[in-house]
Image (cartoon, helix red, strand yellow):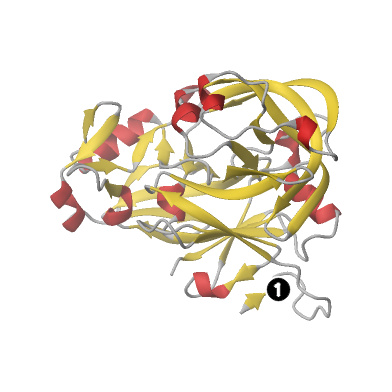
Amino acid sequence: MIQNLLSKNSSHVQKFSYQPLRNYLDMVYVGNISIGTPPQQFSVVFDTGSSDLWVPSIYCKSKACVTHRSFNPSHSSTFHDRGKSIKLEYGSGKMSGFLGQDTVRIDKLTSTGQAFGLSKVEISRTFEHAIFDGILGLAYPSLAMPGTTAVFDNLKKQGQISEPVFAFYLSTDKEEGSVVMFGGVDKKYYKGDLKWVPLSQPHYWQITLDRITWRGEVIGCPSGCSAIVDTGTSMLLGPSKEVAKIHSFISAVHFQEEYVVPCNARNVLPDIVFTINNVDYPVPVRAYVLKVASNNLCYSGFNDIMDTLSESEFWILGDVFLRVYFTVFDRGQNRIGLAPAV
């Protein structure tokens, strides 16, 4: 059943689209899009932590570009060069290149005259080894490159979707089954009712976190703090002091840029509870202690945020949290909806 969130009695046909996502080792979720006429195919991260779309161009000779699909402007009859240089930075790397526009397709949805970045240089070990070619940002227009309209805003403006919402269901362990849906919400992906959380700042998908508790004891965000809900981040990221405290509770040891946890902890440790808008969202141990199939180690789902990001305490709720809770991003009412995922 498709739930028409914002106009229950509407008589128009629901314009709704599912984009399947591939779950790569519970670390990143990618989906396919096409750009140009005829279409050139790319796999992208649908990222609620940024607002721009970019893919590698054939002019890029960086190591990251050589191992990925690249866009050839001369092969598209609808491509237009905007004649502008761009630079984009992410937590995991940066790119520079130029701005173009063309037709972008996501499943059945088409955004015509869509601005997007074409990389000429990519600096990032993450991008080199990534299973995705580029990034499609779904945060607010204020974060987008100046003079461009973000993909979701174009889909809305061009009448491609009924409702200004999109939602994510992220599978655990399984490669198949994850999905981002545009224009509505499918109730089969969650249990119970959606609980709505107003955004504290419609820029990122930023909300207020009341506190983080462990067996009833406050272990993080003691007087409330900000959190960004980010599909493009694998883990739960927080200030180093708070994360160190959590790691001492779960007996995590630093090892090769990761935090390793004894695997038997997955049978005994309690939930870590995130309280948001006076509602408790427990994250069970099997969600925050990750088992990697390729070896017998288990890893913490928590890591340090780069403390330069903010003076005050700040958290990023990444895929570790979003696998547990189906999440609706409602641009119409500047809010996020959360419900236990099936």
Residue 220 location (% of width, % of height): 37, 42
Residue 135 location (% of width, % of height): 61, 38
Please tell me which residue is depicted at 53% across the width and 54% down the height of the picture. 21
Q: Residues within 10 Å of mark 1 (few under 14, many from 20)?
A: some
Quarter of the figure that contains the C terminus: bottom left
Q: In which image quadrant can residue 13 be found?
A: bottom right
Determine which residue is flagged by label 1. 4
Q: Nearer the viewer, residue 250 or 280?
A: 250
Residue 341 makes an appearance in the image: yes
Q: In which image quadrant can residue 275 be found?
A: bottom left
Q: Nearer the viewer, residue 233 or 307?
A: 233
- Quick one: SS at disc 1? loop
Amino acid type for the residue under numbered disc 1:
Asn
Say if 192 sits above or below 273 in the image.
below
Residue 84 location (% of width, % of height): 81, 21
Say if 320 sits above or below 5 in the image.
above
